[in-house]
Image (tube, grey):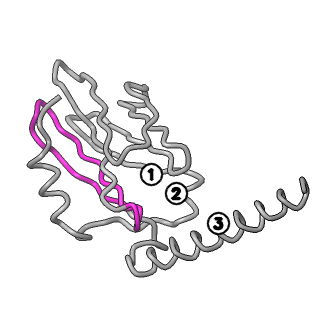
Amino acid sequence: MSNHNDINQNVNETGNQDVEKIGGRSIFSKGFNYKFNVEGHEIHAWGSAKSGKEKVFVDGKLVSSKWSLTKKSIHTFKLNNDSYELEFNMVSLITSELHCILIKNGVHLETQKQVPKYSSDKKKGKTLILVLFVIGFLFGLFGVDAIISLFS
């Protein structure tokens, strides 16, 4: 595994330039999808927004699969005697902006970025998180009250 500090610093500094905004519902039903074309081969990366499952395919053949609930995960595979790394980098948990970075033999080839349309605005994202937190708090509070009332 190579050192990605320089690459990640550059990726994080780009802001929202060239970020593909995709339908929010399709992310939860279809996941994040990235396609790279390298020397006549199609590299397809897929990540579930619900479960954290990630898969990498080369020309339709599964070459890497794992579960990840961290902000960054790396998949390694070989293609034509070259070493590849495909990195998923969750740049912002608030907006769900996910970058997919393709590296060949330690050299950055391409970065693709996606964000759900509904969360591309950080202010709206923070408001959504606050609303969901309050709803969860109220359900928890009334749920505990109901359980205490039931057993007392």
Q: Which comes before the other along the chain, label 2 or label 1?
A: 2
Return the residue at label 2.
27
Q: Nearer the viewer, residue 81 or 4?
A: 4
Residue 136's tag is 3
Q: Secondary structure at mark 3?
A: helix
Q: Position of residue 110 (x, y in %)?
A: 19, 49
Numbered range of the magenta stretch = 93-114
Looking at this view, is 73 or 30 the one in front?
73
For the residues labelled 1 and 3, the Cα–Cα distance comes to 26 Å
- Residue at point 44%, 75% (across, down): 126
- Quarter of the image with the N terminus is top left
Mark 2 neighbour class, 10 Å CA radius: few under 14, some 14 to 19, many 20 or more: some
Amino acid residing under circle 1? Phe
SS at circle 2 = helix
In the picture, measured across the screen, residue 114 lies left or right of residue 146, that is left
Residue 102 point in image, percent of width and height: 22, 42
| The one of 75 and 58 positioned closer to us in this rendering | 75
Q: Quadrant of residue 91?
A: bottom left
Residue marked by disc 1: 32
